[in-house]
Amino acid sequence: MHGWTLIEAAEKVRKKEISSRELTRAILDRIDRHNPKVNAYVTVLPEKAMKDALACDEALHKGRTLGPLHGVPVGLKDIFCTRGIRTTCGSRILRDFIPPYDATVTDKVLSSGAVLLGKQNMDEFAMGSSTETSHFGPARNPWAFDRIPGGSSGGTAAAVAAGLCFAGVGTDTGGSIRQPASVCGVVGMKPTYGRVSRYGMIAFASSLDQGGPVTRSVPDAAMVLSIIAGHDRRDSTSVDLPVPDYLVATRESVKGLKVGLPREYFEGEGLDPGVREAVEKALAVLTSQGAQALEISLPHTRYALSAYYIIAPAEASSNLARYDGVRYGHRARCDGGLIEMMSRTRAEGFGAEVKRRIMIGTYALSAGYYDAYYGKAQKVRTLIWRDFEEAFSKVDVILTPTSPTPAFRIGEKTGDPLTMYLSDIFTIPCNLAGIPGISVPCGMSKEGLPIGAQFLGRHFREEDLFRAAAAVEREIPLPRVAPMGGA
Ligand code: GLN
C-alpha cells in the first residue's frame, strides 16, 4: 500500500477499504525500517500520528470527514512551523526550537484531514542542492544510497520516493522542490510567487521562497496545491486570487498547447546526454498529442545564477540576523558580554554553507558595494523577468531539463560550492521571475537513476503546467517508488 498515490489512499480511507490506523501504522513501520538508512525524517511522531489516525477513524465512523486528505499520512519539510513540535530548519541553531504556532501551510494540511507523520530532513536553512548541509546528516537517494536525494527539500523527495509518506510539502527558493523531485523520480511543483502563504515558513530569501507539493503523481500534486494555495492576510505577499480546481487541468488534452524550447537551456556543455534524450522524449509525447513545439530564446539565462547568488544571500543575511541566542534557539555558554554571546552562538549554531551565504550577503549589501552587486543583480532580475514575458507572448509553457545531471554521489561536490551551485542552473531563473514550475519524471539514466523534465508557465497559470506534466506522466509510465533493494 505504500506505493498508492495520495488520491488512491484518500479514496480507500473514505470508502473504509482501509482504516487510517492501518495505513498510518504501515507507513510508520516502513519509516522504522528504512529511515535509519534514508534519513528522510529528522523527527518522527508515531504516538501523535496514531492518535490522529484514531480520531480520523472515529470521525468517519460517525459519517464525518475533515477534508479531502482525511486519514492519510503525510510529511512536512522541517521548515514549516508546527505548534508544539520541534522545527529545526536543518540547523543546530534551531535544534531544540518548539514553535508556539503553526505555519499556514501546516494549518491547511492538517485541516484537510491529513495525519502528520513527522518533519523531513533538509539542507540547513534550505541552502544547498544535496541535503548534505543538514545538521542531521545527509538524506540518501532511495534509488541509490550512495547518491544525494537533491536539496534542499531532499528529505521530502526521498520520503515520497521511498514510500515513507503519501505526499510532502517542500519549499523552493532556487529549485529546492524541483531538483530533488527530479533526482528522486517524483513530482515537485513550485507555485507562482504569492500563491502559497509563507507565514510560518522559516525564511531563507523572502522574495524567492515558495512552498509547494512533492508527490508520486501529477494529480496528487494538483490536489495538494488546491489545499495549500490561497490568500492569507498574515502574508502580505500572498495574492488574493481565486484558487482554480487544479485536478481538472490534469485531465485536459495538450492539443494546441504551444511548448517553447529555450535554446540557452539545451546548448550548454554541462547537460548530460541521457537527460537531454529523456527530455526530448517528453517533448515527442506532447507533439504526438497535438502540442506544438517552438524554439525560443531566454537570452539573459546566463546571468541568472550570478544574480541569484547575490540576491538570495543578501536576503538571507538579513533574515538570519534574528538567530542571536536572545529570543529562541541555541545560546552559547559564555561568560563574556552580549556581543560575545551572540557571536559565539552564531559561530556554534550555523554550519559552513550558511556562514558563507551570510558573509556573501552582508558584503553585497555593504555601503560602497550595494550598487555594484545588489543593485546590479536586481537589474538582471528584471531582464530575466522580461525574457519570460516575451517568451510567454509566443508560447504557453516552456520545457527544459530540471537538473543537468541525474543524482550525483554523496561527497562529490561538497568541496566545491560553485559546482554545487550549478545543479540549479535550470531551476533558478523561474524563482527570479516568480513564475510557476513543475518537475515530472520522464525517464531513467543508463545507471537506473531518475530523470525529470521541467515545465515553466505564466504567472498564476499552474493549470498549464499540470496539463502538460500529466500528459508526460500518462505516456511515459515509470515506477512510483524506488525498489529499495526489494525491501
Ligand atoms: N540550491 C539552491 C541554493 O542553495 C536553491 C535552494 C532552495 O531552493 N532553497 O540556494
Image (cartoon, rainbow, N blue to C red):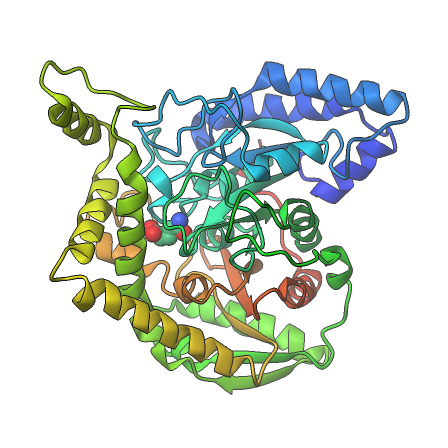
Considering only vertical position in the picture, is 82 above or below 431?
Answer: above
Name the one closer to the observer, 258 or 462. Answer: 462
The image quarter containing residue 265 is bottom left
- Number of callouts in the render? 0
The reply to whether residue 410 is in sight is yes
Q: Residue at x 55, y 67 (%)?
A: 455
Residue 445, image x, y percentages: 47, 59
Residue 382, image x, y percentages: 38, 73
Name the one closer to the observer, 133 or 29. Answer: 133
Q: Residue at x 26, y 59 (%)?
A: 310
Considering only vertical position in the picture, is 364 above or below 167?
Answer: below
Residue 259, image x, y percentages: 59, 78
The image quarter containing residue 51 is top right
Considering only vertical position in the picture, is 428 above or below 32?
Answer: below
Residue 373, image x, y percentages: 20, 65
Q: Residue at x 56, y 84 (%)?
A: 393
Q: Quadrant of the C terminus?
A: top right
Asked whether, in this view, residue 38 is left or right of residue 474, the answer is left
Asked whether, in this view, residue 320 is left or right of residue 165, the answer is left
Q: Quadrant of the N terminus?
A: top right
Query: Which residue in the rendered view is the most extreme toward the right?
Result: 63
The reply to whether residue 165 is in sight is no
Q: Residue at x 18, y 15 (%)?
A: 333
